[in-house]
């Protein structure tokens, strides 16, 4: 009998029942909720007159449409205020732990889960948000769900889910200076396309992945969904255990030591068979940036936008439409374009390590006058650390300002919108048309590349300034 993949080990352990020829009934260990996809789910529960099955397994925080300035004041936007108030009301009524605005643990749901030790190896985790795959960095099976499924988990702590196929992406070698985890994942998605992972759960492996910090691994897993995959995961190791140790809701003392012994078993067997295997060499990965309107339209900063003839005839029409929206010409250089906005933040790159990287890069430099820069910490804890470590001072001396935690300009459901026609370099995960505001244009990149654009005012390879 062939060995098992890490994904199989976790999935199989959580199957409560299987429907012949259909989906599995999967038990969910941790359920994260926010203000946008939970109100209808709670309303559904109440209309059926049932209570939450295991409220202690659910944790809530408002993040998508909260303002990132003046969070101590009442929210001005009516819909945002309604949704945040509704979340507070639902959590109080149903006994769900809520980390609301101004709570020391408040933040983006996929940032606070790991930093509080709620996220742990071997768990199944879901949230009504596609970037739940972030938590897979810890060796957990984590994926996004829809509102009706949020209701299902609240009611039963289980979910109906077809079992995905398995893909392993191995990246070996050593990353060059100035090349980051974000470049790795943008490179992978550019290689396999925005639909190359459809139907799969991806396990990332190889020396490059093992060399990444937990923050870096979270960035890679976070964007698995942008290749169409159901989620991504990385086998836990000493880096994982060191990160989890001592966190608020992590096991402690003997319990932690015992947990680590169990977690050490969480890896794919040597003879495990994947449905698809892909291999990449670190030597080929350089600072990346997107030029189109999906995350698969990415290239090395030093390269040109591909010529139309290089594009698959089946997708040429959408390719040309995408470039027309961006105002770019096929075959033109990527570097040197004037940038209007930069956004550093989101569940992809709003962690303390990302802010440290930006601060280190801009120290002693000044932001270009014409650039509007938003630096948004992923949580109150990140904001606090940035103050304590002097990051806030460095940023302010360079002309940047740290905002308050939230999803911010990642998806423009709040006041942080990039104006029509403006070009933004963002560290978030999506560059769809109007994603950061109606008519806005987004190029996805690493925090280093965003910082380089802020300082030079144009798309620049950060290595030229390191």
Image (spheres, helix red, strand yellow):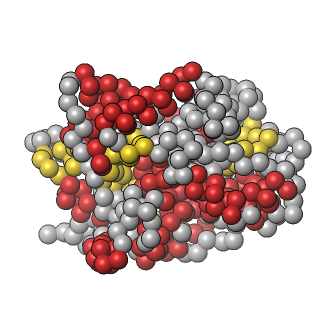
Identify the image quadrant of residue 25. top left
Q: Is residue 182 visible?
A: no
Q: Is residue 139 left or right of residue 303?
A: left
Q: Position of residue 6 (x, y in %)?
A: 30, 64
Q: Is residue 379 left or right of residue 287?
A: left
Residue name at image x 24 percent, y 63 percent = 9
Residue nearest the observer in this picture, 322 or 116:
116
Residue name at image x 89 percent, y 44 percent = 369
Residue nearest the observer in this picture, 288 or 217:
217
Q: Is residue 424 visible?
A: yes
Q: Position of residue 144 (x, y in %)?
A: 38, 43
Q: Position of residue 239 (x, y in %)?
A: 47, 74
Q: Position of residue 267 (x, y in %)?
A: 32, 70
Classify the position of the C terminus by image quarter.
bottom right
Asked if 10 appears above or below 368 in the picture, the reply is below
Asked if 120 appears above or below 172 in the picture, the reply is above
Residue name at image x 32 percent, y 24 percent = 43
């Amino acid at each position: 009998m062939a060995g098992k993949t890490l994904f199989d080990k976790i999935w199989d352990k959580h199957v409560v029942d299987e429907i012949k020829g259909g989906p599995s009934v999967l038990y969910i260990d941790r359920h994260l909720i926010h203000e946008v996809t939970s109100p209808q789910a709670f309303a559904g529960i109440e209309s059926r007159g049932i209570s939450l099955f295991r409220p202690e397994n659910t944790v809530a925080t408002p993040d998508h449409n909260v303002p990132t300035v003046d969070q101590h004041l009442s929210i001005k936007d009516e819909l945002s205020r309604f949704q945040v108030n509704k979340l507070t009301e639902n959590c109080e009524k149903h006994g769900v732990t809520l980390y609301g605005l101004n709570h020391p643990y408040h933040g983006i749901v996929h940032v606070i889960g790991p930093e509080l030790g709620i996220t742990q190896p071997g768990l199944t985790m879901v949230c009504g948000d596609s970037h739940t795959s972030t938590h897979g960095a810890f060796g957990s099976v984590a994926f996004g769900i829809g509102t009706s499924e949020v209701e299902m988990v609240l009611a039963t702590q289980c979910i109906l889910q077809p079992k995905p196929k398995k893909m392993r992406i191995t990246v070996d070698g050593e990353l060059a200076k100035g090349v980051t985890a974000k470049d790795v994942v943008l490179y992978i998605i550019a290689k396999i396309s925005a639909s190359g992972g459809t139907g799969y759960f991806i396990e990332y492996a190889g020396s490059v992945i093992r060399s990444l910090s937990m923050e870096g691994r979270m960035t890679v897993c976070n964007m698995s969904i942008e290749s169409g995959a159901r989620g991504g995961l990385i086998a836990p190791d000493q880096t994982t255990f060191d990160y989890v140790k001592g966190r608020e809701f992590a096991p402690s003392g003997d319990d932690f030591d015992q947990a680590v012994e169990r977690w050490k078993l969480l890896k794919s067997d040597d003879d495990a068979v994947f449905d698809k295997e892909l291999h990449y060499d670190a030597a080929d990965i350089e600072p990346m940036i997107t030029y189109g309107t999906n995350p698969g339209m990415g290239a090395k900063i030093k390269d040109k936008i591909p010529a139309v003839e290089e594009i698959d005839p089946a997708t040429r029409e959408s390719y040309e439409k995408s470039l027309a929206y961006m105002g770019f010409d096929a075959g033109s250089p990527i570097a040197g374009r004037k940038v209007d906005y930069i956004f550093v933040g989101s569940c992809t790159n709003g962690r303390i390590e990302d802010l440290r990287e930006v601060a280190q890069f801009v120290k002693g430099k000044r932001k270009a006058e014409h650039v509007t820069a938003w630096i948004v910490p992923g949580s109150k804890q990140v904001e606090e650390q940035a103050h304590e470590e002097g990051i806030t001072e460095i940023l302010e001396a360079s002309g940047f300002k740290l905002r308050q935690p939230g999803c911010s300009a990642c998806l423009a459901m709040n006041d942080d919108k990039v104006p029509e026609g403006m070009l933004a370099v963002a560290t978030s995960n999506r560059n769809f048309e109007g994603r950061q505001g109606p008519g806005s244009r987004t190029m996805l990149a690493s925090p280093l590349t965003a910082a380089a654009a802020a300082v030079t005012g144009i798309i620049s390879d950060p290595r030229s300034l390191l």
